[in-house]
Every structure is written in C-alpha cells, then in structure tokens.
Image (spheres, helix red, strand yellow):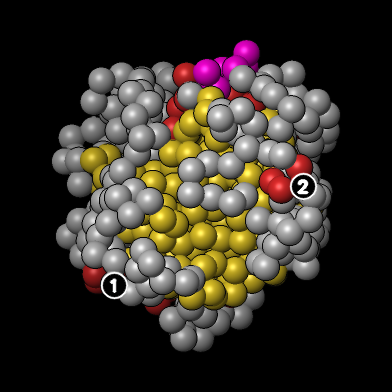
C-alpha cells in the first residue's frame, strides 16, 4: 500500500551498502527518449498522483507496449514518477527502517501465490524482497483503478527499476489501495535502500519524478516457484536470483524498433549474492472450490452455451463463488482453472448454435460492467482484452478453435477472429468489411496444452494482437471505427463431433 510520506531527495554517499548495476545502453536510450517525449501518447490509464500535492498528471503508459512488450509510469513535461516506500508483508526482523511507517499492512497482494511456491515463507518481506507496487484497486467514489494484468503484466513478474544512475531488478509484489489518493511509484524498503541508502525509510522517500519502472508482459517475465530464490536471507541474494531472467528481458528492449540490443548488465555489490536459477512458470492463486465467478471478474461478461435455445447465462448469475457452473463451464477441482468445453459439428452432436452461426460455443460475450447491457465501445478509445489460457484440445476445423474475437456490433460480424489449431498455430482472420472473407495472418505457435497470454487491442483506431508479449499490427481495411465488443472462450469450428477444451487462468478487460 502507498504511504503518505515526507519526501526527501537524498544526495551524496550513504551509510548502508548500496547495490549497483550499470544501466545498459538500450535502457539508458529508452529512459532518455521517454523523458524527451514530454508525455505519453498511448495512455493506458491516467488521473494518478506521484505524491500528495501533485496534480493528477501521472499515468500508466503503453507507448512501448506493442513494440517491446512493456509498460511504465510517466508524468507530463518530461517527468517520470517518484519513489515512495512500502513496508507491507511479512517483515520479521529487519534494520528498523520500517518502524516509522504509519501505513504498514500485514500482507501483500500476492501472498497466496507466494505461499503456493512452498519455499518456507509466508509472504514477501519488504526488508529482503525487491518488489514494486503496481496497479490501483478500490471502491471509493472517484478513486481511479488500473489492473496491470489487463495489459498482460503477470503477478510476481520481473520489473526493472532505473534509479540514481543504476538499474535494479524486482518483482510486481503489491498493489495500491484506496486508503488515500490514487498514487503510483512505490517500492519495498529494501529496493529503496539499494537506490538511495539508509536515508529512505518507512516515513521518508525520494521526491523527484525521475524513476523509471519497466514492467514486462507475458509469462516469460514470471520467475515462478523455481526461477527466483524466494527464501533468500538478504536483498542482494534475492535480487541476484532475478538477474539472468531480467537480463534476457532487458536485452530484447529496442528490438521492436531496430535499436541495438544491450549486453548483459554488470553487477557489483558489497554483499555476496546467489547464482541465479533458471526461470520457471508460475500459477496465480485460484480457489478450486469456487465457481469460475469466484476466481475471475465475470461482471464484464455473459456466457453463451451450446445447449437450449441456445442458453445465455447473464453476468449477475456468473458472479461470485456460488455462481453458475454447468456441464461445459466449470472450475477444475484440482487447479481452480476455468474450464470451457464446446461440442463439435452440430449436425453430429445436436448442440445448439447462435443465430447466424453454424457452430457451437461456450464463450464469454462482453457486457457493460454493472448494468449488464451489451457492450459497444468505440475503437477511438483505449480497449484491450488480455487472457492467459491454454488449449487442451483444439477442434479440427480449417484454422481450429476460435479463442478470442473483436466483434462489430452493428454489422453483427467478427471484425477479427483468433484461432488455435491442433498443431499450436495461432492465426487471426480479419474481415476487410462485413461481407468479405477473412484475411488470415499467423501470430505465432504455442504447443497444445501450454499456457500462454494473448491480448486483443483495438485502441486509437489501431488493431493489434500480442501473443506472450509479441505484438502484430493488423489492417482494419474499410472499417470506420465501428462499435465493437470482445469475446473469449471456446468456439468450436470443427468438422467432426469431437469436442474442444480451453482453460483460462486470467481474463481482464480495459476501456478508457
């Protein structure tokens, strides 16, 4: 959580040991280009403060989301954000620098996931773990919310922090609540010490808006249970365990725009660190005893089923741990995954199809959160659907199972339809207009049964789709800003009677 702190810019040498890593050349170029740009063009969400007394001119920026698979925090007039200090989590014994904090919480946002790693720790420790606070969640009137998962940032994924002419690796470990202003720019006290020494503590922070926080999209950025030394005894030991994976992510920055890749960063420290372990995958914390609505925010969706007239389950019926489950839509009792099954060819299976379709589906259809009315948003704004899923069984249709759509409301046609084939090929078909056949573009390949993240983005009248952070820009041909909505799930296009199976780990919608 974000403390309201007495801010302090800290000059000179400091008493405690200071971790130092050279800023790679491509990161330095990125830092300079962001500051020289003045302000963000692709604003994912704005209306935030960097500190009390600021104007609400700070935002989550996606200018490099398509090209480099990253987001960062930015202000206006060449400003970035400050560095506030977080003392949340399982502090245990430390150096006492959090004793002065007036807003310490006993747990961090992803405590359950940390516990699921079975590494002998109850939660992140702000004295040991280098973590960054990202995202804003709250229910108070006027509080501005943003969920980084909506653009593909995964919990406990690596974040690079550029501060005091050095670069430090951390993880996304906590979120900002609505106990105060909607603030951004905060790190664990150990990361703050690595930047600015012992003068930062639970009640003092770095005031200047010159800190760059780089968050990476996709599963490639998630260390998981075995990709970091979660049971480290010291900050240096934990941070060093992130370096190998962090360096690989950093080396890719600029490759989307032709900038030369960086060499691995050089690290120096006054304390010995452990050798980095190889990165692994990580699961979020899902309750296997809840209906899907208890694990996922289904306030944005109705559910279309392959039975009945066909049947539609309204958003309100889906929500909560006791929400709807059925034969084709349920929670895996071991993993908590959302399972969506869809029958094959209706001529062979007798499944029910929607009007205008020859195929059956178990598919989420976007609605307006709160009212439940059918969504119909303008592509001139910011619109994204980000889903982490795996396809267990694909259908045997021409391109495979449809797993995501951008649907044109008035034309009642899919403007863009994304498919997953039995061989793992992921393609998208974009219709040049409502009556034309789809123009098909390959997006990538993910082996059957392998978890991946896709993001459908139709913002500022530009359509793109990313697979595990790799974005592909797509032509929308003659479409002129049609009102649209998102769909996601399992739309079986098969020729045989064979069913298809999709499992969802996270699903997030953003509009602004």
Q: Which residues are magenta?
A: 317-323
Q: What residue is pinned by disc 2? A: 348
Q: Earlier in the sequence, mark 1 or mark 2?
A: 2
Residue at 44% across, 33% down:
300
Residue at 43% across, 20% down:
103
Residue 7: image quadrant is top left
Residue 511: image quadrant is top left
Nearer-the-camera pick, 350 or 473 = 350
The residues tagged by marks 1 and 2 sit, at their Cα atoms, a distance apart of 37 Å
Q: Is residue 450 left or right of residue 374?
A: right
Labelled disc at residue 497: none
The answer to whether one can see residue 278 in this image is yes
- Quadrant containing the C terminus is top left
Q: Position of residue 63 (x, y in %)?
A: 35, 64
The answer to whether one can see residue 508 in this image is no
Q: What residue is pinned by disc 1? A: 478
Q: Secondary structure at mark 2?
A: helix
Nearer-the-camera pick, 181 or 409 = 409
Residue at 30% across, 50% down:
410
Q: Magenta segment, principal secondary structure?
A: loop
Q: Position of residue 492 (x, y in %)?
A: 67, 51
Outermost residue on the top side: it is 322
Residue at 24% across, 71% down:
36
Outermost residue on the front side: it is 347
252 drawn magenta: no
Nearer-the-camera pick, 424 or 275 = 424
Look at discs 1 and 2 and give the one toward the viewer: 2
């Amino acid at each position: 959580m974000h403390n309201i702190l007495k801010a302090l810019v800290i000059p000179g040498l400091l008493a405690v040991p200071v971790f130092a890593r050279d800023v790679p050349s491509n990161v330095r170029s990125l830092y300079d280009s962001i500051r020289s740009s003045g302000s963000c063009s692709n604003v994912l969400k704005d209306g935030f403060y960097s500190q009390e007394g600021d104007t609400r001119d700070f935002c989550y920026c996606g200018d490099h989301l398509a090209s480099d698979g990253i987001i960062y925090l930015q202000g206006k007039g060449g400003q970035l954000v400050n560095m506030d200090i977080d003392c949340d989590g399982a502090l245990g014994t430390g150096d006492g620098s959090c004793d002065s904090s007036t807003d310490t919480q006993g747990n961090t946002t992803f405590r359950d996931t940390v516990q699921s790693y079975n590494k002998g720790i109850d939660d992140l420790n702000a004295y040991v773990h280098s973590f960054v606070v990202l995202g804003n969640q709250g229910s108070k009137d006027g509080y501005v919310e943003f969920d980084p998962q909506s653009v593909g940032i995964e919990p406990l994924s690596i974040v690079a922090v550029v501060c005091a002419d050095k670069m430090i690796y951390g993880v996304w470990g906590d979120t900002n609540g609505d106990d105060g202003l909607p603030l951004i720019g905060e790190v664990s006290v150990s990361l703050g010490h690595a930047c600015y020494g012992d003068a930062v503590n639970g009640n003092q922070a770095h005031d200047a808006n010159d800190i760059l926080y780089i968050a990476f999209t996709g599963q490639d950025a998630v260390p998981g249970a075995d990709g970091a030394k979660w049971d480290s005894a010291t900050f240096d030991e934990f941070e060093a365990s992130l370096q190998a994976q962090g360096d690989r992510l950093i080396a890719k920055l600029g490759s989307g725009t032709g900038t030369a890749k960086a060499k691995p960063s050089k690290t120096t420290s006054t304390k010995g660190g452990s050798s980095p372990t190889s990165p692994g995958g990580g699961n979020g914390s899902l309750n296997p005893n809840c209906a899907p609505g208890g694990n996922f925010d289904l306030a944005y969706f109705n559910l279309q089923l392959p039975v009945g007239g066909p049947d539609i389950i309204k958003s309100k019926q889906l929500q909560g741990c006791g929400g709807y489950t059925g034969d084709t839509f349920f929670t895996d009792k071991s993993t908590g995954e959302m399972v969506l099954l869809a029958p094959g060819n209706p001529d062979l299976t007798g499944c029910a199809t929607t009007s205008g379709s020859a195929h059956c589906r178990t598919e989420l259809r976007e609605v307006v959160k709160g009212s439940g009315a059918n969504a119909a948003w303008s592509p001139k704004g910011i619109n994204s659907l980000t889903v982490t899923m795996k396809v267990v069984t694909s259908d045997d249709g021409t391109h495979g199972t449809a797993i995501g759509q951008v649907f044109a409301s008035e034309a009642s046609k899919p403007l863009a339809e994304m498919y997953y084939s039995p061989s793992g090929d992921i393609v998208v078909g974009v219709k040049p207009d409502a009556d034309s056949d789809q123009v098909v573009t390959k997006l990538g390949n993910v082996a059957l049964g392998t978890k991946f993240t896709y993001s459908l983005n139709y913002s500022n009248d530009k359509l793109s789709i990313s697979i595990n952070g790799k974005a592909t820009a797509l032509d929308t041909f003659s479409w002129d800003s049609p009102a649209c909505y998102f769909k996601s799930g399992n739309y079986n296009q098969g020729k045989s009677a064979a069913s298809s199976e999709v499992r969802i780990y996270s699903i997030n919608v953003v509009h602004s």
